[in-house]
């Protein structure tokens, strides 16, 4: 997911450079949504891994 967020971020930068403001805004919006989803998924997986490690250590 982070890979796609970076790709859409780059698309928005290139589109903004060439003056396609509508496309740039759309791609930036998609990149923001994907980044937030990635961050949430990362926190959930990290929490599950930490809880699993504590149960194994006991």
Image (tube, helix red, strand yellow):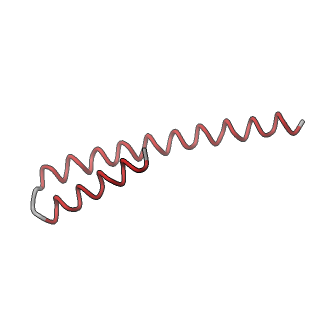
Left-right relation of 51 to 27: right
Left-right relation of 56 to 6: right
| Image position, residue 2 (x, y; %) | 43, 49
User: Compared to 42, does 6 lie above or below?
Assistant: below
- Name the residue furthest bottom: 17
Identify the residue at image location x=18%, y=54%: 24
| Image position, residue 6 (x, y; %) | 36, 54
| Image position, residue 47 (x, y; %) | 66, 39
Q: Please state which of residues 47 and 6 is positioned toward the viewer in this rendering.
A: 6
Identify the residue at image location x=81%, y=38%: 54
Q: How many marks?
A: 0
The quadrant of the picture occupied by the N terminus is top left
Which image quadrant is residue 53 in?
top right
- Name the residue furthest right: 58
The quadrant of the picture occupied by the C terminus is top right
Which image quadrant is residue 16 in?
bottom left
Q: Please state which of residues 52 and 32 is positioned toward the viewer in this rendering.
A: 52
| Image position, residue 29 (x, y; %) | 27, 46
């Amino acid at each position: 997911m982070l890979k796609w967020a970076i790709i859409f971020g780059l698309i928005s930068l290139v589109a903004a450079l060439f003056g396609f403001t509508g496309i740039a805004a759309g791609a930036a919006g998609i990149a923001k949504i994907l980044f937030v989803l990635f961050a949430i998924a990362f926190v959930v997986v990290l929490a599950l891994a930490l809880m699993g490690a504590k149960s194994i250590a006991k």
